Amino acid sequence: MEVSYGRSRVYDNHNLIRLPDGVVCNGNLVNEIFGEDALEINETILARSRAPNRELLSNTQLLDRETDQVVEEHDDLVEEVLRRTPHGFPPHILNLKVGALVMLLKNWSFADGLCNRTRLTVRHINNHSVRCSVLNGPLQGHEYVFCRTEFRSSLTEAGTRIRRFQFPFRLAFAMTINKSQGQTFNRVGLLLRTTVFSHGQLYVALSRVRNFDSIRILVA
C-alpha cells in the first residue's frame, strides 16, 4: 500500500520509488508494461515447446470512415497494418501450440464466465476453431470452442478503420501490467525496461502475488 500511495520514495524531488534489493534480479521474467515486449517474450517462450506449431492467419481489412465499406486501394497500408498488433487486437499471425497459455481479448460469453482477460489453456487446434480449457477460477477445467471473431480499431492516420477477423486470443505467458489487473499468480517476473506511469501502476504489478518472495523484478 505504501507503493500505491507513493510513500516508498527514495528522492522526494524526483518522485522515485526504491525497489527492495531482494526482488531485483537478472532472471527470465513474465510480466511487464508494454505490449510489444509481451508479444516478443510470448513468442520466445512458445518456441521452447516441442508441440507442433499452428500458424493461424487473420483476415484484416481497412474500412472507409464514412461508408464502413472495404477500401481496396489501400493494399500497401494493409500490409503495414498486418505487421502491427493494435491495442486490444490479436496478432495477424497467431502462433499456437497445444498446451499454450492464452488470454481472451474480449467478452465472449457472460453466461459461461468467459470475459476479457480470462486465461485459458489450448487443448485442440484446427483451421476454423480452437478448443481451450479455463485455467483457473470456478470454471477451471471447463472446455469451450472458439472461432474467429471481429475486432475493429479507432481511426488510423489515413482516416480509415481496421477490421480484423481472428481468434480472440493473445499468448499469455507474459502480459502487460494493465492486463494482469484483478488476477493473482503464484509467481511473477516483472520486466521494467522503462519507468512505470504512476505509483498505482507499480502497485498493480507488485500486488499480483501474495508475498514478496513470489516476485522478481528485472530493471533493464
Image: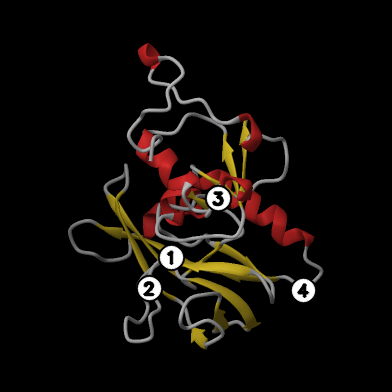
Q: Secondary structure at mark 4?
A: loop
Of badges 3 and 1, the one in the foreground is: 3
The crowd level at tag 3 (other Cα within 10 Å; few <14, some 14-19, many 20+) is few
Sequence-earlier tag: 3 or 1 = 1
Q: Earlier in the sequence, mark 4 or mark 1?
A: 4
Residue bearing mark 3: 211
- Left or right: residue 205 versus residue 218 is left
**Extreme left residue here?**
66
* Image height of 83 relative to 16, above or below: below
At label 3, the amino acid type is Asn
> Which residue is at 50% across, 67% downward?
103
Q: How many marks?
A: 4
Residue 167, position in %: x, y? 49, 73
Q: Amino acid at mark 1?
A: Arg
Residue 112 picture location, percent across and down: 38, 86
Q: Position of residue 87 (x, y in %)?
A: 40, 52
Q: Secondary structure at mark 1?
A: loop
Q: Residue at x 41, y 35 (%)?
A: 3
Q: What mark, if any, has residue 52 been given in the picture?
A: 4
SS assignment at label 3: loop
Distance from label 4 to label 2 (Cα)? 28 Å
Left or right relative to 29: residue 89: left
Give the label on residue 115, or none: 2
Q: In this figure, which colouring scheme has been used for the structure?
A: secondary structure
Look at the numbered disc 2 and give the secondary structure of its residue: loop
Q: CA distance from mark 1 to mark 2?
A: 6 Å
Residue 117 tag number? 1
Q: Is residue 116 above or below residue 29?
A: below
Estimate the x, y position of residue 107 in percent, counting from the top left: 35, 73
**Nearest-to-viewer mark from 4 and 2:** 2
Q: Residue furthest top?
A: 13
